[in-house]
Image (cartoon, coloured by chain):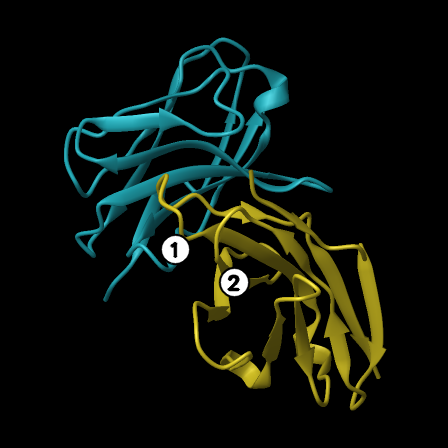
Amino acid sequence: EAQVTQNPRYLITVTGKKLTVTCSQNMNHEYMSWYRQDPGLGLRQIYYSMNVEVTDKGDVPEGYKVSRKEKRNFPLILESPSPNQTSLYFCASSTGREQFFGPGTRLTVL
Amino acid sequence: AQSVAQPEDQVNVAEGNPLTVKCTYSVSGNPYLFWYVQYPNRGLQFLLKYITGDNLVKGSYGFEAEFNKSQTSFHLKKPSALVSDSALYFCAVRDDTGGGNKLTFGTGTQLKVEL
């Protein structure tokens, strides 16, 4: 089954404790991206990747890092999480015309 | 720069009545337009898209959307609403001028269908 998977689905952590949210797709897509969803703001792009070892900032990259060492994986790294990063996070991969979204990761930073 | 506006935070409709969720957009080139739906505690589900061709696009669950270039709109419609259609709906756009596959989303419209 073609899909985008994210782990963990739910995470509660404390300020400053480094965390990684994994994302994996099995559709051989070159393009992957991360979004965060906040009430009243819709989805905003954090980072995207056009291919392996090619990443770039989206609209709200501050406080986040990404890497793309393999085509299928695109982890989101929060080196020092802060409460304003409490949000719902979505990973997506794309054919070029349509994006496929993961199930989301709800992150709470205390 | 590309942008999307969903002017209504919430739309209320009685079951069986037609529904419309509005979306307008702005892009540099030609638009690729999308509607996604999000049910409570779920991810985003693709409903339909306009890339090129017929202005009326039919999608999942009986939804359709009409692309209107002159009004830069892509309103989502359904002839007869169901209570189960109650969800959060997002319009999204990207342009075809390159620069990656970045999607820009609207802020979402909460659809509430009541008996």
Chain of residue at mark 2: B
Quarter of image, res A54: top left
Residue indicated by mark 2: B34
Residue indicated by mark 1: A99
Q: In which quadrant is the C terminus of chain B drawn?
A: bottom right
Q: Residues within 10 Å of mark 1 (few under 14, many from 20)?
A: many
Badge 2 amino acid: Phe
Quarter of image, res B12: bottom right
Dot 1: element: strand
Q: Of A90 and B104, which appears nearest the observer?
A: B104
Q: Residues within 10 Å of mark 2 (few under 14, many from 20)?
A: many
Chain ID for yellow: B
* Residue A57 location (% of width, % of height): 41, 25
Give the residue at x 36% y 59%.
A97
What hue does chain A carry in this figure? cyan
Judged left or right of residue B34, residue B98 is left
- Note whether A42 is above or below B31 in the view shown: above
Judged left or right of residue A77, residue B41 is right
Residues at circles 1 and 2 in contact by the CB criterion of under 8 Å: yes
Dot 2: element: strand
Badge 1 amino acid: Gln
Asked if marks 1 and 2 fall on the same chain, the answer is no
